Amino acid sequence: MKIAFIGLGNMGGPMAHNLHKAGHEVRAFDLSQPARDKLAADGVPIAADAKAAVAGAEVVISMLPASQHVEGLFLGAGELLAQLPAGTLIIDCSTIAAATSRKVAEAAKAKGVAFIDAPVSGGTGGAIAGTLTFMVGGDAADLDRARPVLEKMGANIFHAGSVGAGQTAKICNNMLLGILMAGTSEAIALGVANGLDPKVLSEIMRRSSGGNWALEKYNPFPGVMETAPASKGYAGGFGTDLMLKDLGLAQENAMAVKAATPLGGMARNLYAAHSLAGHGGLDFSSIIKMVQKG
């Protein structure tokens, strides 16, 4: 299948590479030269620009940082949507506002182009291993078309509902992730302040009622889990500013539907303060720095 992949960051690059390894005819593009060079070194053809990437593509996948980037790509000055023939399928894997997904989907539908929002969970490790979870919003028929492509990048595919539902599911998940990472960090920091070994404490909590994904896969304390960003200077992974963006989306959504999210709001404020302290580019698990004793 001919696939255009736009957005080759920490998540998009490995996802495009997995499609290439699976035998799909992938043409990729990113504004970042280092991102393009990295994927080119893996043998993936790189297009000169986004328009060149989508030429002749049956499926267009986007993995971009925020709502404005997705809207700008498809509806902005570049008018990429105008280049796509009827029958093309757009799979947007970005985490953005559900309203933006619906706006792009509506414009796509007017041109006979199918659109699904399919944000992911699983981190960079899942992107590399091809074990991501996809949360999909859109028509069931469009998901059926997308499934053979998504299966080469992920292990779990959930149909959350109509267009935008995938984004709503994703911000609920990431709001919880931000809360539990902050709570896990507090608990580990408290134990360490009392002289406990962070590895021993983490294992105790992992096997007890406080067990959660952070303790299983993404421990925030350096040296506890070799594969976690915490043991790599908090490099790579999922950036603090990206978590802040997602927590902001959750709060915007909560205000729109008049839902109470007090812990989500507190988590957003914590990550905002952490970012303002100069840690926006570090992995979000670096939030533990806010509560560690000096």
Image (tube, rainbow, N blue to C red):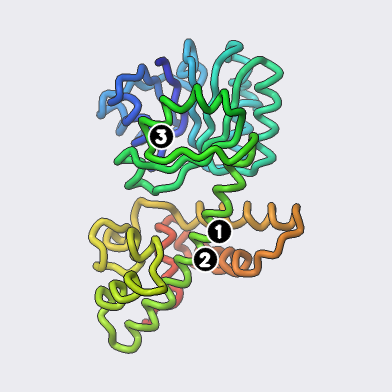
Up/down of 221 relative to 133, above or below:
below
Query: Residue 160 in the image: x percent, y percent?
Result: 58, 41
Residue positioned 48% across, 28% down in the render:
61
Q: Nearer the viewer, mark 2 or mark 3?
A: 2
Residue positioned 39% across, 20% down in the render:
27
Could you give the CA–CA distance between mark 1 and mark 2, rounded to whole angstroms?
A: 6 Å
Are dots 1 and 2 in contact, CB under 8 Å?
yes
Front-lying residue, 176 or 142: 142
Could you give the CA–CA distance between mark 2 and mark 3, rounded to whole angstroms?
A: 28 Å
Residue positioned 49% across, 20% down in the render:
59
Left or right, 243 with reference to 262: left
Front-lying residue, 48 or 25: 25
Up/down of 243 relative to 293, above or below:
above
Question: Quadrant of the image for the C terminus?
Answer: bottom left
Binning the other alpha carbons within 10 Å of mark 2 as few (below 14), some (14 to 19) or many (20 upward) gives: some
Q: Is residue 72 visible?
A: yes
Front-lying residue, 47 or 64: 64
N-terminal label among 2 and 3? 3
Residue 195 position by quadrant: bottom left
Give the residue type at disc 3: Leu
Q: Which residue is mark 3?
A: 8
Identify the disc placed on residue 175.
1
Give the residue type at disc 2: Ile
Q: Nearer the viewer, mark 3 or mark 1?
A: 1
Question: For the residue labelled by badge 3, is the local secondary structure a helix, a strand or a loop?
Answer: loop
Question: For the residue labelled by badge 1, is the local secondary structure a helix, a strand or a loop?
Answer: helix
Q: Is residue 245 visible?
A: no
Binning the other alpha carbons within 10 Å of mark 3 as few (below 14), some (14 to 19) or many (20 upward) gives: many
Are dots 2 and 3 in contact, CB under 8 Å?
no
Q: Which residue is mark 2?
A: 179
Query: Residue 269 in the image: x percent, y percent?
Result: 59, 67
